[in-house]
Structures are given as structure tokens and as C-alpha cells.
Image: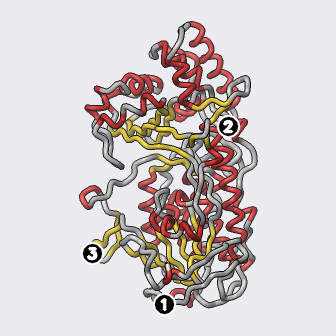
Amino acid sequence: MSGSRYLSIDVAGGGPTGLAFALALCAYRVPARIRIFDPRWRTEGGRVEWRDLAHGNRRRRQIVTIQSNVWSALPPALRRALFDRHDYSEVWPLGSDSPGHHGPPRNLPIRDIEDRLLDLARGTPGIELVPQRYDPTRTDLPELLAICEGAHSPTREHFIPQFGRPHADLYCVDGRPLEETILGMQVDTAATAGEAVLLTAAQNRYLLNTHRGGGFLNMRLARDEAAELPGLGRTPDEALPLDAVRASTLWPAISEGLKLYGIDERSLACVRAFRCSLVHRPRFVAELARETWGCLLGDAANTLHFWPGRGLNTALKSALSLARCLARRRGDRLRAADLVEHEGVMQMLQAREVGNRSWQTMLMRDADGAPAPIDVRIRRGLQGPCDRTALTHELLARLRRMRMRLAHRAGALPDDRLLAARLAALDDRTLKVLVETGPWISAEVGGPEVDVAALLPLPAERRAAGSPLPHQWERVRVRAISRTPARAPAVQSNALGNRSIRSHASA
């Protein structure tokens, strides 16, 4: 059992990963004083709230899928906060990360997840919410810094000398890092879960994720299509002008995607473009300064291709991994050995979700075993002769085979009449692109998953996770952590393999 001394913990980034980590620590009754920093928050009437568009923050609206192995591993307080309203959707089928004994995956808008976790954190003793960006040059560094700021984390970049520089050497084609560009489109849709799943899993050009009449339609672009984007007046993190999109050479392919799912073109509300590329990180735990440990979590740790739907799931697994390791530690002082298991889980997640699932999604193999990026596949579909009858026959046969495989793992699936009608609405080139991109490679990326709860079981005294906190916890007054502002530089080796460690004050 860990000692009674309170750990000082800072969390850089208050999205789902950072909030879930802090809340899991409290649920596991780990003695800690936790500060969570996020510049996307503001204080309104003494209450921390999310900034909205009027305050310069464009909130995310994507729909995300939480696998049942993940949501079932959350402490009860977090599960209740997310799901007790029973307003989630069950769209995707059972699978290796959503086994039947836990139930199907659950869909929620990312905005709802952020709101509910923040609301829970507001009422949790031991957590201080700080509505500002984390300053990695501060002199009151905690014993543990959890870096959860997302893929472009400035705090992580500040500590690159300690974590090591990532590289894309493992994810190159012809000597160049492989990159994809994807459009994400917010739509209204009446498509059923069965329609969305079957039509999506049968090809790799379009993906529709739905939730209660709303949805996000994603479209993978070939390189020449992606080259059209700079001419649409796009600035980073801003939506593409809809009028410009409709007038562009991208519109015919977008329109075809809408037809595939029976979506009215007038329901298209927003279009954004984003890029997917992969890197390998040498480590996820590092000594940032003397007696200060840093851990990368969520998107700050792993860059994933979102197509398989494991981004938030991997992030939550990383948060639970670190929280469980802290719950399992012995003694008062935080040591390198206390974080070795977390480093191991993060390396497993990188191997499983980046090196296996994401990379194989980006570089799928043809029937003859030759790797072919999505750009090659789309261009093959857009070129050469088209035999509409043969293409339609092949797609219908593929859809029927997939329907048979999904029959016992998903809800009601569309019949031949609906499938034939959707294919009849598409032009010849789109049919050929759908054939060339191939069905989802479920067998290749399926199999055993990283099960954090099984790998890191809680000790007996922590298993009543989510039960009322000890009386002494209720008396904790959250305050800024006061530590010696200046520390002597230290250069040493440690159990995690860091070769050169400088004190933060000397950086």
C-alpha cells in the first residue's frame, strides 16, 4: 500500500485524457493533490467552464466510439457520469475490444464527454482546475507531470531532450513518411446503425459514424485531391468554406459519399480537413528534473490513424494505466520503478495501435500481398475502363458476405434491396474506387487487445474504486504546490534508460 503522503501531480491538458486520469486517481483513492491546466477553460461566476466560439474556442463536434473493454474498465463514478443518461448510441458490432460479456461499443459526441468529465471534476475534492496553459518553465514542478495536451503538445516538445525525439523511419514508403489527408464532414442522417456499419466496412474510401440523427462522414483523399485544399481559403483549425467546397473539384466525390449513405446534400453543415501520419516514440516516461517525473498520455503519446476508431480508446487506456500504476505503488516517494509498468503498457499500446492497427490501415495489402497506400488505390479506381455491371456484382457479393459475418455481432442490417438502390445511385468511377479500396481488414488488425485492467490489477485496498473517499480526504484544502523554486542540475542514469537528465531550472 502506498504511503499516506500526498503526491503532487500536475496535468497539462484538460480534455478527456487528462480529466479521466485525474478522476481515476481520485476514484482509486490515491492520496494526491492534482492541478489540471487547460487554456480552453474560463471562469464564469467562480465556476470553470469550457470556452465557446464567442471566447475564441472552436469546440470539437466529432462522434467517438468507446469500446466496451474500455468503458467497462472505467471507475464507476466515471461510467455513471458518462452513461447514466442513457443517451449514447450502440452502432458498431461486438469485437475483440468489445466482447459480448461487456456489450457493444458506445457512441457519444466528444463534446458531451468533455462536458460530463469536467462537471465531475468540478465536484471532486483533491482536484484544482486551472484555466490557463501549462508553463513547463515554472519552478514549482510537481513530483509527476502528466502531459495530455494532444498531438501538438507544447509541453511535450519542451521536454523532448528528456523523452527523446520521435521518428517516422518505421512508417515510410520509398523513403518518405506516409501521410494521408482526410475530410471530416458534419451531417444530419437518417441512416440506421446497420446501414452505417455495413456500407462503411465494405470499402475504405468513406466512413460514417452516427449518433441519434447526426453523424460525421469521413472521406480519404488521393494526393491530387488533397492538393485542392490550399486553394479553398483554408486556415489551420478552421472549417472549409462550404460554397468553395461545393464549387471545387472535390465536390463530386463528396456528393457520391453522401449518396452512398442516403444523406441529403443540404444537411452538410461543416467540412474540415486533417492529416494522418505516424511516428515512433522512444519512451513515454522520463525524469524531467530532479524528483519530477513526466508521462506522455493520449494523443501526446501516440499518433494514430483514426479509421479503426481507437484514438480515444487508446487515450483512456493510457490514463487508466498511469492511474493504476500509482495506485499499485509502495512507499511515500515516487520512484522510477513505480512507473516501469506504465512504460511497458505504453510501449504495448504503441506496438498494437500504431505499428499494427494504424500502419496496416494506411498500407493495406492487395490480394497478391503487395502493399498499396490509399492514394494508389483511389487513383486505380479513377483510371482505366469501368464495367458497371461487374463492379456492382462484386460490391453486392462483398456486402452479402460481410452481412453474414456480422449477423450475430450487430443489430439489424440492410437487405439487398436497399444495398442495390444505394449502389445504383453512384457513378461508375465511384463504384470502381469502392472496389479498389477493398473491405476493412478486420482479420489483419483483429486479435488480442491491450487490456489494462488485466495487466495492472488494483491491490485489494483500492478495488472498491468509486466508493466514498476517506474522511481525511474531504478535509484536504486544494492549494498551489509550494516547493523549492531552484534545484541543482543533475545528470544521472535511471531505471528507465534516460541517459542525460537536466534539472528543469537549468534547462
Neighbourhood count class around disc 3 (C-alpha, 10 Å): few under 14, some 14–19, many 20 upward: few
Can you identify the residue that label 1 sits on? 486
Residue 55 location, quadrant: bottom left
Q: Which is more foreground, mark 1 or mark 3? A: 1
Q: Amino acid at mark 2?
A: Arg
The residue nearer to you, when weighing 372 against 14, is 372
Q: Position of residue 325 (x, y in %)?
A: 68, 72
Q: Amino acid at mark 3?
A: Gly
- If you read the primary sequence from the N terminus, does the residue marked by circle 1 or circle 2 appear first? 2
Can you identify the residue that label 3 sits on? 45
Can you identify the residue that label 2 sits on? 409
Label 1 and label 2: CA atoms lie apart by 58 Å
Residue 469 visible in the displayed image: no
- What residue is drawn where x is 65% and y is 33%? 364
- What residue is drawn where x is 33% and y is 33%? 267
Task: Label 2, secondary structure: give it.
Answer: loop
